[in-house]
């Protein structure tokens, strides 16, 4: 009985210490100075997420050759409202610009978290507008990644290369697949074309039915293949023949160790000196994909293609041994 009572006393003491510790933490939090809400990164991220999720591509634009573009927009946050949205850099379409400002004005953002909540503050955001939604783009990328295989003979002989393929997408079908930029290896080029012709893609939403869109995809072949980025090129109007002007594409190398990028350098020129400088500058700003988990972390050197009308969200190409 005695031991039971002592155990209960010990438990009560632990509870008292725990309560006092929590009280101390709360007191410490209460005395910590709060930063203005616009300097609270967590809240700013939640604001950006709210805008991103609520600004949608207008279906009415599909009747006007489905324009696309990226706008830079400013607005003022004040007491739970977004006021005076203004496009400072246009998408190139008055329909899209109007849709952006109209939708931003209707958004109910998260309540400000921090100090100075009664003070209005201006924000600026970059907002891409495309009839091909991120979810559809992801579905296309996954479907393509599942079908493109490294040709057996090319793998046996260690063939490698970067190619850019183009195709038109309509009602879930791939039309007119072509090679925009050859890998320099016929078997690799032909393998991609064969797989594209045989690949069925997810269907678009009903409001994009019978609309045709052109896409380009970079493919990296080596000892390990890289994931592929699907990049919208443009809307293809009815009866229009595809224009296959080749986008500049540079190959940038870098080292990745312990979560950090270093030794960023140009490996292969795009043939355009200005684009080469831009590609390296983009990489130097940290806009590089982290190597996939399947890659050996002991290998530090990677390469990635940087193409115009593209983004750096593809996985890196095959790593090179140290």
Image (spheres, grey):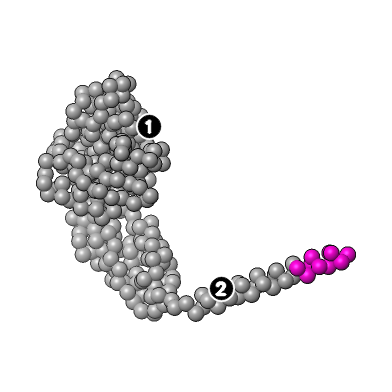
Q: Residues within 10 Å of mark 1 (few under 14, many from 20)?
A: few
> What residue appears at the point 24 percent right and 53 percent down from the top-left corner?
284
Residue 171 to residue 120: above or below: above
Q: Position of residue 136 (x, y in %)?
A: 35, 43
| Residue 41 seen in the current view | yes
Residue closer to the observer: 320 or 90: 320
Residue closer to the observer: 306 or 223: 223
Spatial distance from mark 1 to mark 2, Cα to Cα? 51 Å
Residue closer to the observer: 145 or 41: 41
- SS for tag 1? helix
**Span of residues in magenta:** 1-10
Of mark 1 and mark 2, the one earlier in the sequence is: 2
- Which residue in the protein does label 1 denote? 146
Contact check, label 1 and label 2, Cβ < 8 Å: no
Q: Image quadrant for the C terminus? A: top left
Residue 60 to residue 115: above or below: above
Residue 25's disc number: 2
Q: Position of residue 117 (x, y in %)?
A: 40, 77
């Amino acid at each position: 009985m005695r031991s039971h009572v002592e155990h209960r006393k010990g438990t009560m003491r632990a509870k008292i210490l725990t309560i006092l510790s929590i009280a101390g933490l709360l007191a410490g939090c209460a005395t910590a100075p709060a930063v203005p809400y616009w300097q609270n990164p967590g809240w700013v991220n939640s604001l950006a997420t709210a805008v991103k999720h609520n600004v949608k591509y207008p279906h009415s634009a599909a009747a006007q050759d489905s324009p696309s573009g990226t706008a830079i927009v400013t607005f003022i946050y004040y007491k739970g409202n977004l006021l005076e949205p203004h496009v400072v850099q246009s998408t190139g379409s008055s329909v899209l610009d109007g849709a952006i400002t109209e939708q931003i004005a209707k958004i109910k953002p998260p309540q400000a978290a921090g100090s100075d909540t009664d003070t209005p503050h201006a924000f600026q955001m970059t907002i891409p507008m495309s009839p091909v939604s991120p979810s559809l783009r992801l579905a296309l990328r996954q479907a393509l990644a599942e079908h493109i295989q490294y040709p057996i003979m090319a793998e046996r002989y260690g063939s490698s290369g970067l190619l850019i393929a183009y195709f038109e997408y309509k009602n879930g079908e791939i039309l007119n697949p072509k090679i925009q930029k050859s890998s320099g290896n016929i078997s690799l080029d032909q393998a991609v074309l064969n797989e594209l012709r045989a690949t069925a893609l997810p269907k678009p939403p009903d409001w994009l039915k019978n609309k045709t869109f052109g896409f380009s995809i970079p493919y990296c072949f080596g000892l390990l293949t890289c994931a592929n980025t699907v990049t919208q090129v443009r809307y293809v109007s009815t009866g229009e023949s595809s224009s296959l002007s080749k986008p500049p594409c540079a190959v940038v190398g870098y080292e990745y160790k312990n979560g950090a990028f270093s030794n960023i350098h140009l490996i292969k020129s795009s043939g355009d000196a200005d684009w080469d400088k831009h590609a390296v500058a983009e990489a130097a700003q940290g806009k590089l994909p982290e190597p996939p988990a399947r890659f050996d972390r002991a290998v530090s050197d990677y390469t990635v293609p940087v193409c115009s009308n593209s983004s750096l969200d593809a996985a890196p190409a095959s790593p090179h041994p140290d």
